[in-house]
Image: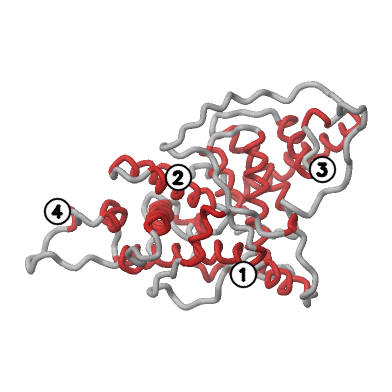
Amino acid sequence: MTVPSTDATQWIFSPSVLLATPSSSSSSFPLSKELYDRARGVEFLYRLGSSLQLPTTALCTAATWFHRFYMRYSMEDYHRQDVAATCIFLATKTEECGRKLRDIARVFQSKVNYNVPIEAITKEAGSEVEQCQSNILATEEALLEALCFDFVVSSVHEVLVDLFEEHTEDEVVQEVAWCIAHDSYRTVLCVLFGVRIIAAACFILAQRMVAGPHSASLDARICASAPSASLLTPPSNKPRSPDATRFAIEHLQFSEDELRDLSEALTILLEFYVAQEVQLNVLPNFLAPLTTVQPPASSPNRTKLYVPYIQAATASNGAVRTDQKPDLNDRTPDSSHGGNSPAKVSSSSGWVPVTGEVKESDGSKGTRGGRLDLS
């Protein structure tokens, strides 16, 4: 596997290492269950960040740290929601979009208590908020140790912006590629490949989906181009192909090894989307065509990383009743648009700090309960 020089080599792992993560090797977590819970944890992280109106850079940085953390710590020792909130808290400091710890804790409580409105978190819930703050601060110590104080994270979205600027692409393709890039952080791609590989996979997959089932296959889009002449030509001097389907790999000048990594990244993304579709038919309509895209034939033979909820639950808990429909709150999270692509700039207002200790309009204190086992 080729590791791009722009990515810290200590954070790029072989897919086989996933079988020996702390969660898999020192606890009862099978790989399918761990990947399922990682996706739920990142979904919870996105929901926290969206409520706090954080920029895309902060969300993606936090999601990357989330996956890096669990390459060194077990999910049985640190709950995914605590780690997600801690990654958000740290990202607000490094990405210069500061939020108060208490605000993050109150949004956290809102999410784990059946989405109770933030303003309904009253004084009576003060102990819960304080406990959440303590958990975040305690987990932050472990997070800093796991990251080795290495806060620099390359951005998939920056590479996508470069591709958009270099090639005039349909706005729909940009929107889909931007969405797939957000969804890529629900997978473990950020600890398997460099950002150039992931961005190219998102871009090519978006092109293929928008072009339709009768367009060039993924194999045709990522295969090494045939020499245009008998004389050897330096890669940097080769004329670009007029075929737009090959723009990404030619612009990024991938080597043979990088093309193999790109093939595997595409396969993992497709596995993730198919797992959601098979599970409960919950994939949004605009991404449903991705489930019919054939993965590259050049992908290595290996066990699928992403399986439907029923299979993940079976691997973790033994037999599952086939006549019992899974709880929608306990499924793999929906794919969703996140942030804004350059083709669609939002005019949202800035972050408004959480203030006041207001009860609900009917005078009740809202629903209170323990931590929900959902994202």
Image position of 264 (left or right of 339):
left
As drawn, 107 above or below 167: above
Picture coordinates of residue 156, whole percent (x, y): 44, 47
Q: Which mark is residue 113?
A: 3
Identify the element where label 4 is drawn.
helix
Quarter assignment of residue 285: bottom right
Image position of 190 (left or right of 73):
left
| Tag nearer the camera, 4 or 2 | 2
Q: Which residue is mark 4?
A: 237
As drawn, 89 above or below 236: above
| Tag nearer the camera, 2 or 3 | 2
Identify the element where label 1 is drawn.
loop
Which residue corresponds to the image point at 44% horizontal and 49% vertical from the top-left? Answer: 177
| Tag nearer the camera, 1 or 2 | 2
Q: Which residue is mark 2?
A: 175
Measured in 3D between alpha carbons, the distance from the residue under mark 2 to the one under mark 3, in whole angstroms, is: 32 Å
| Amino acid type shown at disc 3 | Asn
Does label 4 or label 3 sit earlier along the sequence? Answer: 3
Does label 4 or label 2 sit earlier along the sequence? Answer: 2
| Amino acid type shown at disc 4 | Asn
Measured in 3D between alpha carbons, the distance from the residue under mark 4 to the one under mark 2, in whole angstroms, is: 32 Å
Picture coordinates of residue 2, whole percent (x, y): 37, 63
Measured in 3D between alpha carbons, the distance from the residue under mark 4 to the one under mark 3, in whole angstroms, is: 59 Å
Q: Which residue is mark 1?
A: 307
Residue pushed farthest left?
231
Q: What is the crowding at mark 4: few (fewer than 14 residues within 10 Å), some, or many (at least 20)?
A: few
Does label 3 or label 1 sit earlier along the sequence? Answer: 3
